[in-house]
Image (cartoon, helix red, strand yellow):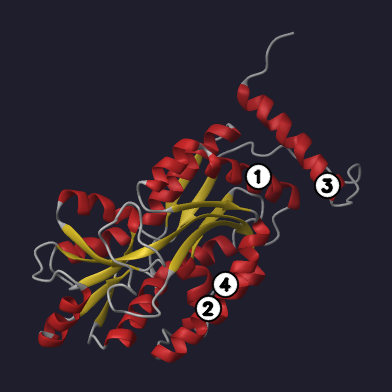
Amino acid sequence: MPRQPEATRRRVVVGVAAIGSLVARGLPVLAQAIPPYPTRPIRIVVGFGPGGGNDLLARLIGQKLAERLGQAVVVENKPGAGAIIATGYVARAAPDGYTLLLGATGAMTVNPAVYGKLPYDTVRDFAPISTVASFPLLLCVNAAMPVKSVAELVAYAKANPREANYASSSAAFQLATELFKMRTGAPLEHIPYKSSGEMLAAVLGGEVLMALADALPVAGHVKAGTAKVLAITSAQRAAEYPDVPTMAEAGVPDLEVMLWSGLFAPAATPPAVLNVLEREIMEVVRLPDVHEHLRVMAVKPDGGPARDLVRRIAAEIPRWTAIAKSANVKLD
């Protein structure tokens, strides 16, 4: 008997798994037609421009997902408005498993805290699939800046108020930096950018004084000697940055921030399709080369089940809402 191509065999396995999932949920298998999935390319929409942490993460995961499912996975960047454009777009997309969102903390739990009106509701409009990764933020400055510590940076900002500004590419980075301002008294003005790449370019180009940035796009600049990191927002030092103090060690208490990125589908996506995606993403994140790629970027692989992402969202929206209220940040 001729051997089936790998992609065909995988779709057969996916179909069998979908039937098993329906049985496990107590749904009538014979009454439901289960189309094969996927049979065409899948899009992962990212709310930021190319070169940022979420863009790099989506491309890494998308490549591995394509290999496993036997269909192309295309990353589509829709930057702007703190990822509101992209998130609203996926919320309105056909719920068929072919348009997905790599949703980050900013879009999914911070935007609801700072915007009175959004074109989407995180809880109502999306089906969480899996948390892909979580990561701390790094306080970055231009390597040419005459500061070597957080204390020196704060003193410099106070002595040079016209230069005291910061970059952010999402509401999550903005609120984290506003929390930094509250804890240190640094007189920093917010300058928005569309992606982590643009945000770091502004730091390196001298347009802004500092940024709290995700580690993925920072690593190359640190290695090249064009950026330096003064502190990290995790509870412990990162193995990749052993000489970089935590915020607490740098004299900034109560500033522990771990952001995350997860995969989402429109809310009405069939459960059988969601189960396929959940299982495949969890397997992708467990791959040794994916683990290693993320590790060297100081990003923690997650790959947890959908239920963990549901709980995370439920806990974080109230937390960020309280921080936004304390910092008096409303973005309407």
How far apart are the alpha carbons under marks 4 and 3?
Answer: 29 Å
The residue tagged 4 is: 120
Relative vertical location of residue 110 with respect to residue 294 in this rendering, above or below: below
| Residue bearing the label numbered 1 | 279
- Residue type beneath disc 1: Arg
Seen in the picture, residue 52 relative to 232 is either above or below; the reply is above
Residue type at the position of mark 2: Pro
Query: Do callouts 1 and 4 mark residues in contact (Cβ within 8 Å)?
Result: no
At a point 43% along the width and 91% down the height, the residue shown is 326
Q: Earlier in the sequence, mark 3 or mark 1?
A: 3
Q: Secondary structure at mark 3?
A: helix
The reply to whether the C-beta atoms of the residues labelled 3 and 1 are less than 8 Å apart is: no
User: Extreme top residue here?
Assistant: 1
Q: Which label's residue is closer to the chain start, 2 or 3?
A: 3
Regarding residue 254, the answer to whether it shows in the image is yes
Instruction: Identify the residue position indicated by label 3 in the image.
Output: 22
* Alpha carbon distance from label 2 to label 1: 28 Å
Q: Residues within 10 Å of mark 3 (few under 14, many from 20)?
A: some
Other-residue count near label 4 (Cα within 10 Å), few / some / many at <14 / 14–19 / ≥20: many
The kind of secondary structure element at disc 2 is helix
Image location (x, y in percent) of residue 178: 34, 82
Q: Mark 4 or mark 2, which has the lower sequence index? A: 2
Question: Which residue does the numbered mark 2 point to in the structure image?
Answer: 112
Callout 2–callout 1 Cβ contact below 8 Å: no
Earlier sequence position, callout 1 versus callout 4 = 4
Kind of element beneath mark 1: helix
**Residue 304: image x %, image y %?**
60, 53
